Image (spheres, helix red, strand yellow):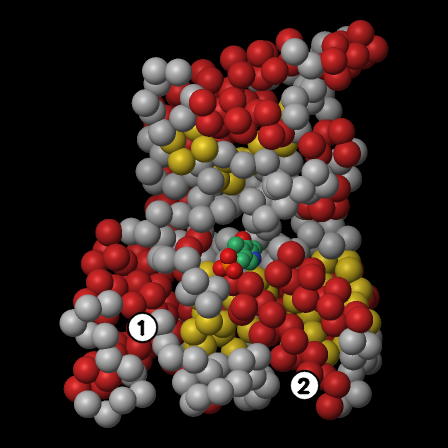
Amino acid sequence: MDNKKVIYCDNAATTAVSKRALEAALPYFTEEYGNASSIYMHGQNAAKAILAAREKIAGILGCKASEIFFTSGGSESDNWAIKGAALLGKKKGKNHIVTTVFEHHAVLHTCEFLETQGYEVTYVPVDENGLVNPADIESAIKDTTCLVTVMFANNEIGTIQPIEEIAKICKEKKVYFHTDAVQAVGNVEINVKEMGIDMLSLSGHKIHAPKGIGALYVRGGINLPNLIHGGAQERGKRAGTENVASIIALSVALEDACKDISAKQERLSKKRDRLIDGILKIQQTRLNGDRNKRLCSNVNISIRGVEGESLLLMLDMYGIMASSGSACTSGSLDPSHVLLAIGLPHEIAHGSLRLSISDEVSDEDVDYILETIPKVVDRLRSMSPLWERICKNEGLTGTI
Ligand SMILES: *Cc1c(COP(=O)(O)O)cnc(C)c1O
């Protein structure tokens, strides 16, 4: 294909490192390479830069610098919060965890592991719009519950959960509340104190910082045991020489991501809504996830009679990079656990398209995407025995 256009619509999988984040990080690879634990100037400069980054991040999230711990990313933050709370719970004879069925695998697989270690986990279902009902969380909490963990926004269908209400319930019940906010940070206003959040995970590479850096907010007073033992870094809580350059980049990227979120929501949701409305004009399609309580960047649509992977390959030929379900599950033939959780049958869950946009996607790009997708869908459907069967048995009209 002679088309040279490249439109990146997979920002929920990862993002490009911003110029500002990169430039802020670069000196720490070369001139300022000292170990932050060393006492000479090079080391102390690194230590000072880490402290400044920690303070900046704390200011943005509405907490103290001493409540921010740097990690290698979202998965590590989730593991640390959940396994840490589980160990704290065990000391008090509490071995029950409440989560939801549609969490990221960093949360689900951690919970499944804990089940093999004598813990009990309740996986609360979500409704057909991909929303958690706080009352369901409340009734799942027992005397033995040591942690509730519910994601802030879902990575596949973009639905934003009633986090403040859930946090309030946890506070009343005196149970720790953790949220995986990897997708929400930078897209939704977050203040951990005002929202009553005890622990929050975030990841750099979803907000234009490098891969392999993230943070965990842990409310003061929660003495989380280490996930990684060794040196005294991160106030003795997370050993390993600091990833100074990436920590600096994270603080800059987070600052940019959280600057004027409401303006960003307005800009992006206009493009998102054009994409949703445009793609839904294709017959036998459906939007996955609540129309309003969703990230300004997320489009997730099921297209009947089309296989997800083929659609992605065809779109790639037209320069459109998108995903089907999440990057973590593609490569396996299982349909997305998130789409199954909102009640989609296997056949429809297989033919889903996620576009996660950023400001880099222009209005012209949206036009191009909306011209391209119907062409590609027509083409794939014309080759699909499944589509032929659907047309014969059910006719072409109607929604799914
Ligand atoms: C990407 C993602 C993660 C994992 O973060 P990494 O930094 O890649 O480990 C966890 N949770 C959610 C919701 C995500 O989108």
Q: In this view, does 157 lie above or below 304?
A: below
Q: Is residue 300 left or right of residue 389?
A: left
Q: Circle 1 is placed at which residue position?
A: 244
- Local SS, label 2: helix
User: How many neighbours does mark 2 have within 10 angstroms: few (below 14), some (14-19), or many (20 or more)?
Assistant: some
Q: Tell whether label 1 touches label 2 (CB within 8 Å).
A: no
x then y, percent, for residue 375: 52, 13
Nearer the observer: mark 2 or 1; the answer is 1
Quadrant assignment, res 303: top right
Query: Is 197 placed above or below 371 here?
Result: below
Q: Which of marks 2 and 1 is nearer the N terminus?
A: 2
Instruction: Look at the image and tell me whether residue 59 can be seen.
Output: no
Question: Would you say 298 lies left or right of 386 here?
Answer: left
- Label 1 SS: helix
Question: What's the residue at 69%, 61% (across, down)?
Answer: 109
* Foreground residue among 148 and 1: 1
Q: In which quarter of the image is residue 36?
A: bottom left
Mark 2 to mark 1 CA distance (whole Å): 30 Å
On the question of residue 146 being in view, the answer is: yes
Horizontal side of 374 relative to 50 (left or right) equals: right
Q: How crowded is mark 1: few (under 14 residues within 10 Å), some or many (20 or more)?
A: many
Residue for badge 2: 88
Q: What residue type is labelled 1?
A: Val
Q: In this view, does 354 lie above or below 42?
A: above
Residue 158: image location, x then y, percent: 56, 45
Q: Give the number of the disc on residue 138.
A: none
Q: Could you say which is closer to the camera, residue 6 or residue 147?
A: 6
Q: Considering the image in quadrants, where does the N terminus appear? A: top left
Residue displayed at 78% across by 33% down: 345
The x, y position of residue 381, in whole percent, is: 65, 14
Q: Which residue: 69% across, 74% down? A: 147
